[in-house]
Amino acid sequence: MTSVQLEHLHKQFGQTVALDDINLQIAAGELFFLLGPSGCGKTTLLRIIAGLLQPTSGRINFNDRDVTQLGTEKRNAVMCFQSYALWPHMSVRENIRFGLRVRKMPANQQRKQIDSVLALVQMQQYADRRPNELSGGQQQRVALARALAVKPACLLLDEPLSNLDAKLRLEMRSEIRRICKSGGYTTIYVTHDQKEALSVADRIALLKDGRLVQVGTPADLYQRPANSFVADFIGQTNLIAGMVVGRQGDLLKIETPAGMINAKGASLGGQNVVVSIRPEQIHLSRNGDVHATSSKPEINHLRGWLDQTTFLGESSEHVVSINGHQLKAISSPPMMESAGEVGLQFSAADVMVLPE
Amino acid sequence: MTTTMLSTPARPALRLKRRDGARTEPFHIVLTVLLYLFFGVFLLWPIVQIVKTGFVDRAGHFTLTYVHLILRDPVLLRGLFNAAEVAALVTAATLAISLPLAILGVRYEFPGRSLLSGLLLVPLILPPFVGAIGVQMVLGRYGPLTQLLHAGGAGIDWLGRAPLAGIVIVEALGLYPIMLLNLQAALANIDPAMQQAAANLGAGRWTVFRQITLPLVRPGLFAGCTLVLIWSFTELGTPLIFDFNTITPVQVFHQITDVASNPLPYALVVVMLVASALLYVVGKVVLGKPFDSGTTRASIASSATRLKGWRGWLVTLAFLLVFLLAVIPHVSVIVTSFSATGAWYRSILPTHWTIEHYRSALIDNMAMRSVLNSIGYAAGATVLAVLAGFAAAIVVVRSTVPGRQLLDSLSMLPLAVPGLVLAFGYLSISIWLREKLGARTPRFLDVQEFPVVMLILAYAARRLPYVVRSAVAGLQQTPRDLELAAANLGASKSTVLTRITGPLIMANLVAGALLAFAFAMVEVSDSIILAQRTDYFPITKAILDFTQRLGDGLYVASALGVWAMVLLALTIWIANSLLGRKLGAVFRI
């Protein structure tokens, strides 16, 4: 089991800064995600950890041993490529054997090891097929098996599910978590799919324009986003710019274009803030006795105009206009309403106050 | 630049998993029938005719007598061995030159990379045998090399000492671009992740090269080796210039005069054909198994590593050296063409310079006419090849007509069949027709009377593979939906063809056409065998004819060779400026 430390990593391609001062501590056996929009530098970072790219400056440690200058072939940080990179001139078995052979493992042990990783990814019956005779999902499993066979110090997955269809992607998510956790591998997983990250990761590092924006558990990122970019990128949210105008107990009073909103939490110092309200936290009601409960300051009440309702099966999504500002709300179970005036309720505890 | 048409035999064709919307229309069937007729008459019939003449005696019975005669004749046998030796050495030499260059060129960025990569293809604009004239001058007993080494006196008889070596050098320097193009294309097609994955799993550079890179370029290796091997095995022009007679192609050529009565040259040609076919099959078995292109296509843009400092310049130097070596024949042909008759003798450079030979070439009836003839023949052949090639591509890619795979293979056959064999086949058909029809033989079918039609057909058949590959690649890169969208909007089939499909693959067609044209211009085997009357000589035959003329013959031949080079360079330059970067894209299939 290997822990990975990245210290002040910096990477430049010509004039373009791809990575800027990356510092990360990844624990042994952790399933760690690098998440971010395309072009944020996450794949570059993965390739640097793999030794396929050299950082412009900075250090990479495996178990506190500096491996920055070590070639990819000596690092044992094994990568699953996005394209799988299965060698078409070799069978599944030969593909997996390759890494064992260059490690000079005795033949009988090789066979045992190949069989065990094939069993792990449930591909025993395809051992003698060529890669081009396999489906995308099967190729993905073989690529994973090839990497796992050599017992990597660190397993690197580059968008492993991006070439699969939606249903298979869901299946493979939990499958990958099962496999990585059962072997206790330190795994670094690159994706741009926040749902994938939220559902599989132990911890997530969110990158933007080559910089780390926030590192934390999925719940941290979802419930306590560091800024509006994180709130917006992780899950859906409504972002409204506002101004802190006062306090009432532990509540902040924030004036926004959608009306006065109360939020629980400490002041951020400055007056100008952005509030984030998750759509699923907003409850819609038609007319009803909105005013009856309005006395409680920890429940926010707004009135708006329901523009649009989209049926999603297990829930429904609504677009509500308040003073020309549009908010999204999700009702579960679905609520089918025609356009018209509605009331919106959400708890002050669910309003996240973020720096502007 | 003009690149990788020659590499296309390592084709991704027909290995598409999805054949989007391929379906058979009535006109597909018509095209298929016409194409089978075309291949049957102009490709298979000549081969059958040759085989028949070589194996059937006067009484019409099957016989092995002729083959037997060959195998018992020590001179003919020697010729076969020599041809095989030349072929093996030339292939090995081109491989030794091309493999390092291809790897360096694909992997690294160094000063002057694109210019030098283009320059390395220069030998393609001249058939090897014209270069042989130049090499003969350079390596002459009292030629410039001898002078450079200060070996006056008796001189050094380079070519007399090792006659095969001269042939091998000339052919290797003339043919390596074919190998280079194939290897480059194959290397560029490898997904860099394939090699990175191996290194990432712990493999060293050598292991990655041996176990991953080399197997993945096998199809390109096969294509390159086959083309060079068969070409050099049956190359006629170069040994003719060197006056080397104990080699099969020349032996066949010298028997051409009594061809009507003598089946021996046919049997010899059959032996060559069988040997070529065997080489092809063996190569295919050992190297050829292609991979599903779907899994080998690059997923990461392959970016060349920039070599810094002296390393970069070292690679530049290597490229430059090969280029300088490769253009020795060309340069010396140019020098010869400007040298006064007999003035390049016992001196490093000619002692007297003149433009007299160009004037001779211009006023000489045969020379000037041969240039015009070649342009005409090549143009005719190109039109024919483009029509047939486009039709074949449509059937192969867009239809489900049974037998389209066979059609695809047939269209590649001319690459595996020596030019000499086809040329002889046409000749033998013409003779056979005259025997059958006597005086009623239509003039255009009688090669001895009027070889134009046969020459155009032969050129077209020989150059067809380039056009077919090019058009197939174009069609495969053009989503069927674009055509269906037009049809869906109410366009007729012909409108779709002329307004949508045609323009979309125009770049491919033009590229294939220009290549076909360029190679038809410098075609040797058909030209030498089929054109027997001075009036109809193409440029290559005229050059060969001049070299046999005493006095200023060699010099006028060189001047004519320079004309050919200029013409070809011009064609390629026009193609390049017409299509710009698109041309390069076309060749990177």
Image (spheres, coloured by chain):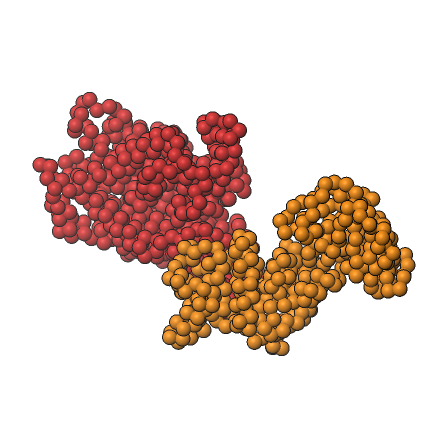
Chain colours: A orange, B red
The relative height of residue B354 versus residue A128 in the rendered view (above or below) is: above
Q: Seen in the image, is B293 located left or right of residue B282?
A: right
Q: Where residue A285 sits: x, y (%)?
A: 77, 49
- Residue placed at 84% from the left, 55% from the top? A293
The relative height of residue A227 versus residue A27 in the rendered view (above or below) is: above
Q: Nearer the viewer, residue B483 or B416?
A: B483
Q: Seen in the image, is B250 located left or right of residue B396?
A: left
Q: Seen in the image, is B257 located left or right of residue A25?
A: left
Q: Residue furthest left?
A: B59
- Residue placed at 65% from the left, 46% from the top? A311
Q: Where residue A83 sits: x, y (%)?
A: 51, 56
Q: Nearer the viewer, residue B540 or B4?
A: B4
The relative height of residue B408 versus residue A105 in the rendered view (above or below) is: above
- Residue placed at 13% from the left, 51% from the top? B72
Q: Where residue A67 sits: x, y (%)?
A: 59, 73
Q: Nearer the viewer, residue B443 or A37?
A: A37
Q: Where residue A160 sits: x, y (%)?
A: 54, 59
Q: Residue furthest bottom?
A: A64
Is residue A272 shown to the viewer in this render?
no
Is residue A293 shown to the viewer in this render?
yes
Q: Seen in the image, is B203 located left or right of residue B127?
A: right
Q: Nearer the viewer, residue A313 or B62?
A: A313
Q: How many marks overall?
A: 0
- Residue placed at 15% from the left, 39% from the top? B262
